[in-house]
Structure formats: structure tokens, C-alpha cells
Image: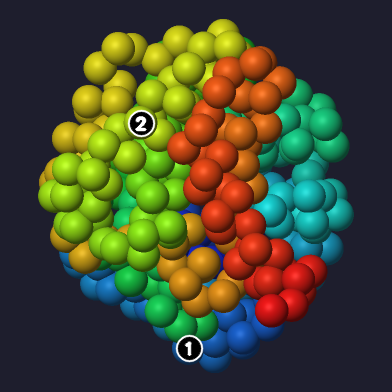
Amino acid sequence: MRIVVIGVGGVGGYFGGRLVQAGEDVVFIARGETLQALRTKGLKVESVKGDFALPSIQVTDDPKQVGPADAILLAVKSWQVPEMIDVLRPIIGPETFIVPLQNGVEAPGQLADAFGKERVLGGLARILSYQIGPGEIRHIGAEPSLAFGEMDNQKSERAERLRQAFAGAGVTAEIPQDINVALWTKLLFVASWGGVGAVTRAPIGVLRSLPETRQMIEQAMREIIAVARTRNVIMPEETAGRAMTIIDKMPPNGTPSLQRDIIEGKPSELDAWNGVVVRLGKEAGIATPLHSFIYQSLLPLELQARGKLEF
């Protein structure tokens, strides 16, 4: 398969790098300092699953040089998805499909509006990783895995081909029975932990050990389950319990990207995590008091990071 990876951060860098390691035909699209570092030094990954370096990779900032892809892994931030529409156009051929790997539940619909439902799979990544410098990724925890599938949950040859490519790279990839449930389950995990983490600025080891903050995470999960049900996404009763079990096994110093971005004064995925819960809850008449508190509390910092508010 010819696979194009757009975004070379903690997700795109790690999973794209593993595909290159396995000999897959992978082209990265990057820009700025990341592009220059990848061109001159290649890609370096520090991982609890084993460090690796790729001194020479295919990378460009011009999608017109890439040609049609079989699969596109879109690994940019959720708020950058609309900006990627024009970037994607030159890469799309007759059989190309796009797998968005953003946290959140809106990216598949945004891409389907631009390119048609037949072009888009649902997708998500499970990994605790981040960029420590241009072209340098650090994976500190969580078993790296992916889930993707057709939005109508039909089995497809293209999804299976991509799954096999990742399997050949030693990466666990699954095609879930219901990709919508998988997407909302991931949102439940990251938005609950991420929102509470961003407000408190405490690592997961602290959040899960204090009864008060643990209760906040659990309440945030219950609110997401209630909103998901209004969208005909029915998560199993044990979903929140399973998520808390994962949280209890995470490295105690772990922090989500939302929390790190807020602390560092960068634009974050606040709108796509806690914001979407608030918006969809209002549409359905479902109260989401904790997510509303988180969103409203962090909004001034988010607007400041985007240059829309000064203080």
C-alpha cells in the first residue's frame, strides 16, 4: 500500500514510523521545523516498546509531489482538520480512502462533507506519546494500537488491507464491530481525563488517587455516555469502569495533550473534546454541568492561545 501520513507528532510519527520500519511505502507530509528536521536527520522515536531511528524517510510539504495514495492517515489536531481539505485534494485518487485519527467524533463527518462518505473511515489511536522536538517522538506508555472501520460498520477489503499492513509492522490494529461506539468510547476517555487534568494541572497519578478528582473523572464519563445515547450510540454499561481500569494502570506522571497544550499556551482540542459534549448535550436537551464547567473555565486560555483574547 502507498500510505500518506499527514502530521508527524506523537501519533503520526509513531505509527507512520513503525510502517516505514516494516518496509511499507510511506510518505510523510510536514511543514516548518518538523519538515526540515525530517529532511536532514530523519525520524527518531523513543519508546517503551523499543527505540528506533529512521535516518532517511520520504517527506515533503507539497502534496502535489506525492501523487494518489491508497490510504491517508490524517494525524493532525482536530481543529486543523478543516485546514487539511485543500492539502488532501491532490493526494486523492479513484481508490483513496482517508482515516482520521483525531480524538473526538466530528472529523469523519467533516471529511465526508468535503470528499464524500465513501472516502472516509472512522479511526482512532491509543497511545501516550508526544513530540519532544522536530522529528523526535517520545512514547511513554499505553500499548500502541489503532482502531478503524467503515462508518456503516460493513466489512471492507480496504480496511483489512490496512489492518494487515499494521500487523506486519507489529502494531495492533482492530476493526471494531461498531466504529461509532469506539469513537465515543475514546472521547469518553480523553475528554474526561483531559478536561479534569487541564483544569487541575495534576498528573493522572494524582487525579485517580484523590477521591474528589476521581469522582470528577467518573462524572464526566457519565455525562458523555448520556450524550452519546441521544446520538444512537449505545455504549456497554461497563464502559466507564473499563476506562477507569485503564487509567489506574497508566504511568502516574501521564498527562493528556489537552492539558499539556493549555499549560504551554498552545491552541488545544478543547472544542473537540469537552466543547463537543456541551454542544451536543444542548442540542439534545441533556445537562452536562461538569463539561460545561471545564469548557467555560478553560475557554479564556484557549482564546488567548489563539490570539483572540489578550490578558
Relative height, residue 92 to residue 8 (above, below): above
| Marked residue nearer the N-terminal end (1 or 2) | 1
Q: Amino acid at mark 1?
A: Lys
**Discs 1/2, front:** 2
Residue 44 appearing in the image: yes
Taking depth in this image into account, of 36 and 289 the one nearest to the observer is: 289
Q: Amino acid at mark 2?
A: Gln
User: Residue 139: x, y in percent?
Assistant: 30, 65
Q: List the residue tagged with mark 1.
A: 41
User: Residue 98: x, y in percent?
Assistant: 66, 39
Q: List the residue tagged with mark 2.
A: 219
How many residues crowd around disc 1 within 10 Å: few (fewer than 14), some, or many (20 or more)? some
Question: Tag 2, which secondary structure?
Answer: helix
Rendering colour mode? rainbow
Quadrant into which the N terminus falls:
top right
Relative height, residue 107 to residue 136 (above, below): above
